[in-house]
Image: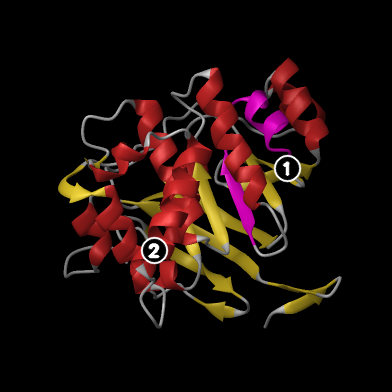
Amino acid sequence: MNSMKGGDVVSTLEIRNLSAGIAGNSIINDLSLIVNTGEIHALLGPNGHGKSTLLNVIMGNPLYEVYSGDVLIDGQSIINDTVDQRARKGIFLAMQYPQEIPGVSISDFMRTAINANRDKPITLFRYIKDLETASKLVGFEFDMVHRSVNEGFSGGEKKRNEILQMLLLKPKFALLDEVDSGLDVDALNLVTAAINQTHDQEHGYLVVSHYARMYHLVQPTHVHVVLNGHIAISGGVELVNRIDQEGYHWLKQEYGLDIADKTEKKPMIVMQNCAAKTRGQPK
């Protein structure tokens, strides 16, 4: 159920004792986390310890297997929902490696996505105004929205397009997987300004980044270090600053945490994979 906080309705995304992986390899191990709207949760940790996997499992990527545990929105399990069902319930994933979709313009793609979440289709006038506003916020020339989704885009343009989609869809919970990678300073400032503009009591964020600059521009309310597929330690922005200065080795010295050197297995996210769960695919 939704709760009340300071007069505002607060929604909750809960990851409860989640274990998951791919091709029989466990990556997430009994991980629990609660994210409320109005909060920004930062996920830090060495490569290969499960941060991107966690976001994909929350979004419902069928290439990942869930071994145990649950994912809930406002107390209701979504673990058996497809990607589109989770999107309609307010989850959005900005991907680390956005895919090109030749022949489908950004404007048509986004209008279809918006209408899928509405009882009544958005008017053309309202949609164009919203699209113009969002394009300016992320530094897109408006003509770019008539191009095919991500086709011929630079890495930075693809990441800005992910944030453009987030601005238009207005999800309850945005999962941002290294949206700062590949961005120059100007683009990073535009993207983080857009995130900050939408940060209010109706929106929650789960953000993965390796760079302290990202978290200085979008200041998290909670910081978690993911090691070996579970949350090893949580704190505030001071954790970001210390890790930026000292790395992760002090966690082993002070807390006795094992920090294995891993490379996380990340399958390519293909549109048809996310459309439905078919025979032979892991659930």
Q: Is residue 90 above or below residue 40?
A: below
Q: Secondary structure at mark 1?
A: loop
Residue 145, quarter of the rendered image? top left
Residue 80 badge = none
Task: Kindly identify the amino acid type of the residue bearing the numbered disc 2.
Answer: Phe
Q: How many angstroms separate mark 1 from mark 2 (CA)?
A: 35 Å
The residue beneath circle 2 is 125
In the image, residue 206 lies in the stretch drawn in magenta: yes
Residue at 64%, 33% (x, y): give it.
258
Q: Give the x, y percent position of residue 121.
A: 35, 76
Q: Is residue 66 above or below residue 41?
A: below
Most foreground residue, 91 or 27: 91
The residue beneath circle 1 is 220
Q: Can the viewer see residue 50?
A: no
Most foreground residue, 225 or 84: 84
Q: Give the x, y percent position of residue 278.
A: 18, 69
Segment tinted magenta in the rendering: 203-219
In the image, residue 31 lies in the stretch drawn in magenta: no
